[in-house]
Amino acid sequence: MAEQAHAHAESLALREQFNTAEQQKESSTFGMWVFLVTEVMFFGGLFLAYTIYRNTYPTVFGMASTSLNAVIGALNTAVLLCSSFTMVLAVRASQLGKRKAIVIFLILTLLLGMVFLGVKAYEWNEKFVEHHIPGAHFHFEGMAEQGPAQLFFTLYFVMTGLHALHMVVGVGILSWLLYHAARGRFTAEYMTPVDIAGLYWHFVDIIWIFLFPLLYLIDRHMK
Amino acid sequence: MSEHVDSVKTYTAVWLILLVLTGVTTGVAYIDLGAFSVVVALVIAAVKMLLVALFFMHMRHSTRLTQLAAAGAFLWLFIMMAFTLADVWTRGLVGTPGR
């Protein structure tokens, strides 16, 4: 009877509590998506706050928004999209069990992710120089009321900051994957961690796909 | 799903379309479309999101359960946004009883 409890030999791809490897894989994917839905709500609250205040102070938000550098924003969006492309190629390589390709594509994704963060750091530093950091020394040129402008930059820093925090976490996850991929832990039979990390990385990309036009672009034509 | 391995060609095409759309959304932002610039920006962003979700996140190969869970995000988001905005945008339209 004790034998029957272990209906199958345990492996990374098929843990004891699952009937089939497919079921295990599906549970992981489903679990990750449920987590991503909570993340949608998490960022959704900020997008909602942004919508409300942009409608309350359209002129000030327009002026503050156009002070951001749209060219740098667009280039950084391209960098992030490239990192998603290399990430999906890493997932594909792991589906095919190509160990060397997984490592190469993970390194590329990691590098592109760091380039994005570097550009972001450069942009934030620009805001420091321009006194566009909300607080005692905040000053936005050509405006009688500083409050609404501070509100824009508060939302800008919270939203891009939270996004960057997700990127930093992503860099950590990629490093962990890289370590295990180099040691040959991922095979065509078991590549769930790469797949799941891919979902996370692409999700963070999607958040930026919305942040970029909303923060940088939609008031551009008024200038 | 390891049984669905998309071709590098497919991924490259999606990646290039995403880059082109980024260029388009940036370029179109400088054209005065009035209130429609928000609409255009959001439609392009939504198309990009769908491309990433369907291809890069393998949503088109996912099981119905996973697709339903992902689609659920829009339902919850819609409820949060619609109910909050219905309050904020209609304040002051009707008088407050007792005041």
Image (cartoon, coloured by chain):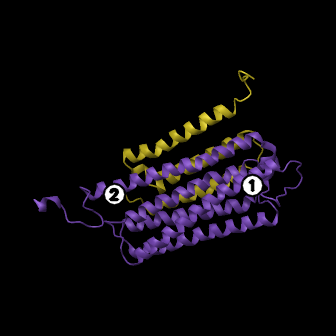
- Mark number, residue A153: 1
- The residue that mark 2 highlights is A25
Question: Going 75% across and 67% down the picture, which residue do you hit?
Answer: A125
Label 1 residue SS: helix
Question: Going 34% across and 70% down the picture, which residue do you hit?
Answer: A187
* Residue B44 appearing in the image: no
Instruction: Report x, y in % for residue A32.
Output: 43, 55
Between residue A37 and residue A106, name the one nearer to us.
A37
**A184 up-or-down from B99: above or below:** below
Whole-angstrom CA distance, mark 1 to mark 2, is 42 Å
Q: Residue furthest toward the left?
A: A1
* Residue B77 appearing in the image: yes
- Number of residues whose C-alpha sits closer than 10 Å to that of mark 1, classed few (under 14), some (14–19) or many (20 or more): many
Q: Amino acid at mark 2?
A: Lys
**Chain letter, colour purple in render:** A
Quarter holding the N terminus of chain A is bottom left
**Chain letter, colour yellow in render:** B
Q: Is residue A150 left or right of residue A198?
A: right
Question: Going 86% across and 48% down the picture, which residue do you hit?
Answer: A145
